[in-house]
């Protein structure tokens, strides 16, 4: 078991840290309180670079927090915080003159506890609930309202109309998710650190299975055949809750980039877009681009739009007019008819024959460039 010089003392002054190679692996070296310690650099969770983490005094000592999702390790012992049994590989360090040497074999081996993901096992294993015959229609209402002051939402009313019709006329199974009731964290942008930091299931879901997006993932990916998304128009765009959901669906789209794996199989999406003023086509275009990137198929004429024009500032008349509208009654049903007709075709697609013409990591212009801090 040989000691190997990994860097010089002058390169690691007190209160600093550094990632260095040790044989084929990388270790995180820490110099704090005039003591040097070394643990494996690859976090036991998803291999985030521990050497880039924040070192703080907490619990019973000095801990480094993984910059990807926040797992913590004692920098002197490699152990997880009190109450956890994970153990990071710990290496013996010695200083000779200006040389820092690390033993190439760990004195304490890494051990990763089995973290209980039973509650989201259906997502981990992608236990699809759709069948060749199923007609499962998921409505997602993205309007944001104060539930203590209930009021009429045109987008949600049209969605309810569509779902009722699907159930009564087509014998479809229907579900409605109101994003405002779910309560979920915003995407924290782990993808911007490394593609492997954006995981399926979403790392937020892993950490907090009760987060409201767990329901969206479960219903949208595993249960639904058709997804009807309803949004109001807010300053010419879909609602902020729609975007909050879309950002959390990054982990679904990223599976294509990461693993060449399309999670959305044989599914149809359509949209209900309502606003006092206009911009329906831009909202529809924006939503369609995102949902096509997830792998959904659209029927011809895949959205229903409602607006009364640029000068329609008499908003008190919007609901009145909407409720009376024959057009809404008719098109909500036609949207469902078209979606179900398309679903019949989409059921015959063999998803394994479909390619996702999306970039993979190796397509990057800097694919050859090596980031010395990363573990893969
Ligand atoms: S917390 Fe380290 S990779 Fe997730």
Image (cartoon, rainbow, N blue to C red):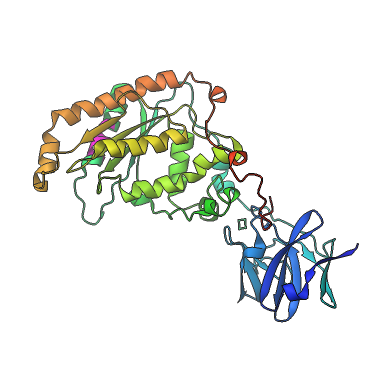
Question: Eyeballing the image, is 123 above or below 111?
Answer: above
**Residue 103 or residue 165, whichever sits in front:** 103
Rendering quarter of residue 272: top left
Q: What percent of the width, then of the height, locates residue 187? A: 46, 53
**Residue 343 or residue 168, whichever sits in front:** 343
Residue at 25% from the left image edge and 37% from the top image edge: 280
Q: What percent of the width, then of the height, locates residue 234? A: 25, 48
Whether residue 139 is visible to the viewer of this picture, yes or no, is no
Question: Eyeballing the image, is 279 above or below 330?
Answer: below
Question: Eyeballing the image, is 200 above or below 78?
Answer: above
**Residue 262 or residue 151, whichever sits in front:** 262
Residue 44 is left or right of residue 180, and the answer is: right
Q: In terms of secondary structure, what is the magenta stretch mainly?
A: helix
Residue at the right extreme of this rendering = 1
Rendering quarter of residue 20: bottom right
Question: Eyeballing the image, is 299 above or below 252?
Answer: above
Whether residue 370 is visible to the viewer of this picture, yes or no, is yes
Residue 193 is left or right of residue 180, and the answer is: right
Quarter of the image where the N terminus is located? bottom right
- Give the quadrant of ligand 1: bottom right
Q: What percent of the width, then of the height, locates residue 31? A: 71, 75
Q: Is residue 221 magenta?
A: no
Q: Which residues are magenta?
A: 156-162
Residue 231 is left or right of residue 254, and the answer is: left
Residue at 24% from the left image edge and 49% from the top image edge: 235
């Amino acid at each position: 078991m040989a000691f190997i010089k990994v860097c010089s003392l002058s390169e690691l002054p007190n209160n600093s840290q550094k990632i260095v190679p040790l044989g084929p692996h990388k270790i995180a070296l820490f110099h704090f309180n005039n003591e040097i310690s070394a643990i494996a650099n690859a976090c036991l969770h998803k291999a985030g670079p521990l050497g880039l983490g924040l070192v703080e005094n907490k619990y019973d000592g000095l801990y480094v927090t993984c910059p990807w999702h926040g797992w913590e390790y004692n920098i002197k012992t490699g152990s997880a915080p009190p109450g956890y049994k994970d153990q990071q590989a710990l290496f013996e360090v010695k200083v000779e003159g200006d040389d820092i040497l690390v033993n190439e074999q760990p004195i304490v081996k890494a051990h990763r506890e089995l973290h209980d993901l039973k509650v989201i096992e259906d997502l981990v294993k992608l236990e699809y609930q759709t069948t060749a015959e199923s007609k499962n229609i998921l409505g997602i209402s993205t309007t944001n309202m104060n539930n203590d002051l209930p009021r009429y939402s045109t987008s949600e009313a049209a969605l309810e109309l569509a779902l009722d019709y699907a159930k009564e006329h087509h014998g479809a199974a229907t579900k409605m998710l109101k994003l405002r009731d779910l309560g979920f964290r915003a995407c924290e942008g782990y993808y911007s650190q490394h593609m492997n930091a954006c995981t399926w299931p979403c790392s937020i879901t892993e950490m907090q299975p009760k987060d409201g997006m767990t329901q969206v993932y479960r219903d949208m990916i595993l249960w639904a055949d058709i997804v009807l998304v309803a949004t109001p128009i807010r300053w010419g765009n879909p609602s902020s809750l729609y975007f909050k959901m879309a950002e959390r669906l990054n982990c679904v789209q990223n599976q294509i980039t990461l693993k060449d794996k399309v999670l959305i199989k044989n599914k149809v999406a359509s949209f209900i877009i309502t606003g006092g003023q206009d911009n329906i086509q831009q909202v529809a275009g924006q939503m369609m681009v995102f949902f096509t990137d997830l792998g959904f198929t659209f029927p011809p004429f895949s959205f229903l739009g409602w607006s009364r024009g640029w000068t329609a500032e008499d908003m008190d008349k919007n609901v009145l007019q909407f409720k009376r509208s024959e057009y809404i009654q008719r098109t909500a049903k036609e949207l469902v008819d078209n979606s179900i007709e398309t679903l019949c075709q989409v059921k015959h697609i063999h998803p394994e024959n479909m390619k996702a013409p999306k970039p993979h990591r190796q397509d990057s212009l800097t694919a050859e460039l090596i980031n010395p801090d990363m573990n893969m």
